[in-house]
Amino acid sequence: MTIKTVGVVGAGTMGNGIAQTFAQAGFEVRLVDVARPMIDRGCRAIETSLAKFVEKGKLTPADRDAILGRLHTGTTLDVLGQADYVVEAISEDVQAKKALFNALDGLTRPECVLASNTSSISITVLGAATTRADRVLGMHFMNPVPIMTLVELIRGQSTSDPAMAIARDLCGRLGKTAVEAADYPGFIANRVLMPMINEAVFAVMEGVGTPEAIDTVMKLGMHHPMGPLALADFIGLDVCLAILNVLHDGLGDPKYRPCPLLRRMVAAGQLGRKSGRGFYVY
């Protein structure tokens, strides 16, 4: 199957990055969100990102204009009717995702592959919300999408070999490295990452060290490019909490219990970079 037109649902941080990456690779892109202000915000983010590539000499102004010319937007799913491949990048809420996949199943062509950028939710559950579970898979990009090269590909219980082959081929065309993960809560990346972040939050709560001290130890002692608490702020503390809840509920192991301090910060609206305050002030 030749993929020419790609739909992206959700124009937030991940969605606009995914849309930009596909457009940069030469695909026609349809970016959809529920309201025009969200679309406009996403498009501004794409323009800012492309401007940085131009400044660094990685793109020419003509390249940038061609990329933007391949990007089309809309506020209804109808614009995805002729898409060859759709990537969902909405909030990490299983009910919202199931409803979206059910809707996409009803309006896209039968051969269209439906992929989710979910970082932790079961692909099998999302596939079961459609009549094409064999063509539903996980395609978990890393943030920032235009720069990070890893993509986790997740095979649901019914995902077919041809669908996975299409996704792997797309990753190659995007210049990404695909790693396949089984359909367990958190997959590979967050199964390993989130317990580390959670333990760092426990260390803050218990007074083991300040956020600065904990992040410095991990950067200088373990050679991490970013400390776990700065990374949590970058990801969004609400997103981290949602993923830990999926791990805790899905695996039933108390070691995944979200730290009470993390719950309290999210309840207070201290979500990290996007709110201006998390473990650090922005």
Image: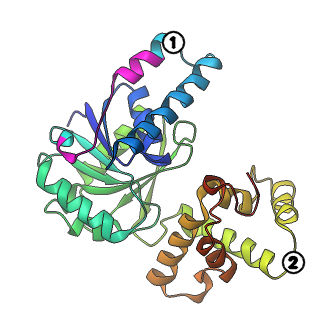
First of labels 2, 1 by sequence position? 1
Q: Secondary structure at mark 2?
A: loop
Q: Which of the 4 image quadrants contains residue 43? A: top left
Dot 1, how many residues are within 10 Å of its Cα: few (below 14), some (14-19), or many (20+)?
some
Closer to the camera, 160 or 212? 212
Residue at 82% from the left image edge and 55% from the top image edge: 219
Image height check: is 190 above or below 6?
A: below
Residue named by callout 1: 61
Give me the C-alpha separation between circle 2 and circle 1: 50 Å
Q: Which residues are magenta?
A: 64-78
Q: Is residue 75 magenta?
A: yes
Q: Residue 233: tell me if it is visible.
A: yes
Q: Secondary structure at mark 1?
A: helix
The amino acid beneath tag 2 is Val
Dot 2, how many residues are within 10 Å of its Cα: few (below 14), some (14-19), or many (20+)?
few
Closer to the camera, 74 or 255? 74
Residue at 61% from the left image edge and 80% from the top image edge: 258
Name the spot of residue 35 as percent of width and height, x first: 33, 47
Quarter holding the N terminus is top left
Query: Is residue 176 shown left or right of residue 2?
Result: right
Q: Residue 124: tell me if it is visible.
A: no
The amino acid beneath tag 1 is Pro
Query: Is residue 224 shown left or right of residue 88?
Result: right
Residue named by callout 2: 208
